Image (spheres, rainbow, N blue to C red):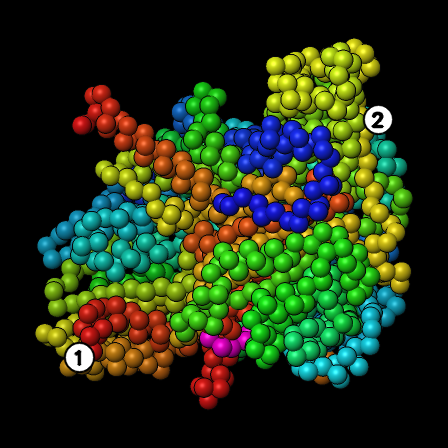
Amino acid sequence: MLRLPVFDVAAPDKLTDALRSLADSQAGARPLGGGTDLLPNVKLGQTRMAMALLLRGVGELRGIERRGDNLWLGAGNTLAQVAQDEQVRDALPALAHAASRVASPQIRNMATLGGNLCLDTRCRYINQSEFWRQALGGCLKSHGSECHVVPGGQGCVAALSSDTAPALIAYDATVEIASWRDEGVQTREVPLAELYDSDGTRHVRLESTELLVGVRAPVPGLNVRVGHRKWAVRKSIDFPLISVALRLELDGALAAGGKLVVGVLGPRPRVLDLKAFAGRALAPDFARDLGQLAFDRCRPLPNVPYDAEYRRERLPVEVRRLALSLFGDQAAQS
Amino acid sequence: MNGPISGDKTAAQLHRLAVDEVATDTVAILGGRHGKHDALDLMTGAAGYTDDISLPRMLHCKILRSPHAHARVLAVDTSRAEALDGVHAVLVGAELPIPYGVIPWTPDENALALHKVRYVGDPVAAVAAESEDLANEACRRIDVRYEVLPALIEPEDALARTDVKIHEDNKHGNVTKRVQLAFGDVEAALAGAELVIEGHYRFHGSTHAPIEPHCAVAVVDGKGLLTVWSATQVPHYLQRELAKVLELPMRQIRVIQPAVGGAFGGKSEPFALEFCAARLAQKTGRPVKCLYTREEVFLAHRGRHPFDMRYRTGFAADGRILAVDSRALLDGGAYSSFGLVTTYYSGQLLAAPYVFGSYRFDSTRVYTNKPACGPKRGHGSVQPRFALEVQLDKASRALGIDPIELRRRNFMGEHATTVNGFHVGSNGFLLCLDAVERASGWRDKWGKLRPGRGIGVAGSCYISGTNYCIYPTDLPQSAVQMALDRSGRVRVFAGTSDIGQGSTTMLATIAAHELGVELDDVRVVAADSDLCPVDLGAYSSRITLMAGNACLQAARTLGERIRGIVADVWGIAADQVVLARRRASEAGNPERWMPIQEAFLLAEGKLGLLGATGSYNTPKTGVHGDYRGGTIGASPAYSFTAHVAEVQVDEETGEVEVVQVWCAHDCGKAISPVLVEGQIEGSVYMGAAEAVMELHEVMGSGLRSDGRKRDPGPGRDGLLAASSLLDYRMPTSLDVPQLSALIVEAPDARGPYGAKEAGEGPLHSAIPAIANAVFDAVGVRVDHLPITPAKVLRALRERPDRC
Amino acid sequence: MPIAEPLDPARARRIAVVRLHVNGQAYAVAAPTHWTLLELLRYQLGLVGSKQGCDKGDCGACTVLLDGLPTLSCITLALSAEGRHVETVEGLGVGGEPHPLQRQFAERGAAQCGFCTPGMLMSSAHYLDELGRAASPVVRQQDIAAALGGNLCRCTGYTKIFEAVQAAADETCDRARALADGPGGAA
């Protein structure tokens, strides 16, 4: 069978130990939550790893709790836990939905929220065997100098194929990042949208010594509606070909603003501000205009393995349907 | 599930009276709703697949493959690999120079490249090492120098660019086979037709993707006997080809096929791994295992040929088919595989269940620099069936005839001869049409469903094995040895390959039914060339008819002996002794009986050890035409199928949801109805997946016929677009339509109890039924498969009412 | 596959001892650090029921229950199972008696080639576990299909698998009701 290359394994049970391992640059450790993204990538030789840092035993990464106006989710929660958690379903239903749509039941039992946010970018020219990529002659992300998605392109445009990232960005979530420095734990917190860079070879703005330990999402008030929608060819197992989240802020019955977050375009989700739509009624024409906005501003690339032109055509339909589902009865009546 | 739908009872005479009389007693076995004979082993992990075999001192083999779609191999330097501690042997092409091929007329493959590589993934060298890790490392240390040649990716280009030859010694450029046959005056019939439908159809490539990857284990014993365990569906052909390539007599080779985790045609010829494992076992004197990665399974391929088809079909005003004219270009990939047969099948298997007034086909198969295509479930006939059945649907619309009615009007009848000279025996096609019409509620639905919802029908026919073996021989195609033992058990020895379809259950059912024992009392020893008589293998849906007949013959021989002895003891006529339910009893007098074991002992005491053999060979006269090629595609008996599919089309996204498929299949006689339903359901699932989802696609355009030349260096030409079970999207449990299997029984005189095939026929018309349903739903045709959302959207945009 | 392979000093590999429970039995198993749980089960413990189909978590044939949850053993490191409970298809039956799922699968033709079956059974077993824990269990085909969403089958079209799981689930519900209604039950 396809074999993993040789590497060491460390299984810390305390965050400080995990961070120390990461800080030890000699170790070349990679954090491993559920391993459902990392291990296939390592098996395929597209990711190298000198040491797997098993995070499962680190208690500080677990738990889902209300902290004031926020819901805090440890990065080590599995996607199944996130999808099934009552607090998440109440406070962040679009996140629960996104988590419930990731891959397959087994993968949701294994994969962690942190892992899904730090998912490696995907591309039809990368997620292949070592043999395949060598036959191709490599690419920007894989010992080559040519981009096959955008001929002549200088930057890797592999797609972040996370389902939870668009949803959490729509919730204005921030991520808590920790590292071991100066004999202590240093933490910083950044908006999730700013975690991502446009370079598909290093799209997660984490130093190799840093670990994503948790997510903090403000629990939206009654005037905010957030939804998520995924499309893939198959209803299970597949990565998304379209993953969109919509945040709608309301002023009474009218839109006041919000954002549309579109995933699976390139290395980072596209965030479109909806201030310009303030004052619009929650009616089908508004939904259509949101779809048009997505169509005008987003151009799916032939990076993930599906017809890019079709993905572009489909995107506005998915956005419109997502909007209509958030409008609820108001749209149906108009 | 409803009971079987019975055919015309004129066929009842085919059943022997004695069997019929006890049928009420034994219904639990023959035709009973039992599961698989070996089912519990499959449930517990005990079944034992090839990769489950681990032998002491076993080495692991890995194969180095070509990164180029087309190249000359200039040099292979294995020294760095051989120097690695733990590497025991490295094998290159020159050590296995004899070419092989499953069709003896077209041996064009070598286990490892001799001078050229012809697709990305063509095997070049092999290693045997202490572990898979070491074998992989050794492969990385083999240095190969290539001279890269222009690659031909599209079949049209392969046809046009005669200056680039994929096989230098091929006679006709890159054409591996061309078949042109005509029956009647097609042009005149078309000229006189009320309606001529012209269509251009494309059928895409798809692959079998069994969940078990190919695997082989080889070992040589002290006497020089080579034993090869392999996940194959043709152990006999494997034994022959091993003998040829390794230059060993057949008697020095034992092939064993353990449990096989699915095949669907993808394991029906020898592959590089079997030759490499065997040769490496010879070289090292140690057992060697070779297990393909999933990517290697995609490279081994032999899947459905992509077809480009142009059809002209002439109809009379009443819907009768006056002429069928077909031209097809088959994309064969890098090697011949079964291609000679595929090319014939692309035309020969189309001429039933309808009467063709006249028929002509012209099929050309070409080499391309891609993984070789071969036989996938419904070999060579699924693609033309799609074209024809959509043509019929178009005609029914144009003529204003209900498409089921149109098909009824063209029905050929039973005991009839097709336009190309095949004799068809039983034919339950009308019963199939009736069954799907009724079950689907067709009359309330066709043309009457809300926009976006549609229903479509299609029919088809398939073979129950082929009349001729792949190599010329007069020997039986199937044979069975049967022995009774003193414990009251029956042992059946057969070369048959159970690849999941249930051939072992079929043999056990026949033996149990005939000899009056329970299924659990039958032990089937199968697919071991040392222990079993030859059976040609699990392909062409041949085993139930052929091995079933052989088994029936042996069982009846033994049954007659036992009945004779028991009858003597009781002083009654032999035909008054009934063997059923572990008893021998007197017909009509259930008070008089003895345990079956006692009957066996009695008979052994009188006659000596109880053993018998059965053989089956196909009829050779009156079954096919006497023109060149007229034997290819002829079968002892034909199965018939009708499908109705109901779909929901999302007009905004173009997405087609196949909601339900009803499939009625005439299998002659369902020996094990649960298994027949399973074959129907699995076939329909696979067909539906091909219709809307699956695609085995190769990247790049290669060298173009228009002279435009791509950089022939390492690039994307010839790379598989999807070589994992993630990217090759086969339906999950959440993507599968509701499947309704309807068994129809029109017993055929040539089948055991009238049985015909069930494993491949039920795939065919699923695809055109879905395509026709899409038209019913949204009024557009997608004639180029698969029916993707993008194609549906494009067609919708061009729909007249949208323009 | 032997653990003791000739060692290339440049590729010196680490071997660890994994302590885990498999089908209720405690083991201490030596395994190289880069081995998967599937490799440990198949090569070290001889539990070949769990299958390798896709190499990397795409097909579900390697599904085992890890601490009761369906898990892809082909992309789980062996060391990740340290201190945990693994259940494989070999442990499904009790005392030589097949599990109701195994019996239903067998009788209803839910396995053809059988290669996906061990994984399919483990996902099904988890579905039954959940069902048995529900306060008022209801068997729904869409829940069964969802529970099996990570297990590819290439033979059956899933139809007979759904039927078999449904039948076993109905048995589970009947048992739960009988328990509730019987003497000493909650009623």
Quarter of the picture holding the N terminus of chain A: top right
User: What numbered label is drawn on residue B223?
Assistant: 2
User: What residue does disc 1 label?
Assistant: A281
Give the residue drawn at x 52%, y 31%.
B44
x, y percent for residue C34: 49, 41
Query: Relative to the observer, which residue lies in front, A306 or B17?
Result: B17
Chain of the residue on which disc 1 is drawn: A
x, y percent for residue B340: 80, 60
Choose top left, top right, bottom left or bottom right for residue B784: bottom right
Give the residue drawn at x 47%, y 43%.
C161
Label pair 2/1, CB-CB below 8 angstroms: no
Q: Main secondary structure of the magenta part?
A: loop
Tell me if residue B48 comes above or below residue B154 in the rendering: above
Give the residue drawn at x 27%, y 55%.
A96
| Separation of marks 2 and 1 at Cα, in angstroms | 87 Å
Chain of the residue on which disc 2 is drawn: B
x, y percent for residue B406: 62, 70
Specify the segment rendered in magenta. Answer: B778-783
Tell me if residue B505 comes above or below residue B292 in the rendering: above
Q: How many neighbours does mark 1 have within 10 angstroms: few (below 14), some (14-19), or many (20 or more)?
A: many
Which amino acid, by three-letter code, is at mark 1? Ala
Q: Secondary structure at mark 2?
A: loop
Quarter of the picture holding the C terminus of chain A: bottom left
Which amino acid, by three-letter code, is at mark 2? Lys
Q: Nearer the viewer, mark 2 or mark 1?
A: 1
Tell me if residue B8 comes above or below residue B461 in the rendering: above
Which residue appears farthest toward the front when viewing the image?
Answer: B588
- Magenta span has B237? no
User: What numbered label is drawn on residue A234?
Assistant: none
Choose top left, top right, bottom left or bottom right for residue B67: bottom right
- Is residue C78 visible from the viewing direction of this image? no
Evaluate whether label 2 is on the same chain as label 1. no
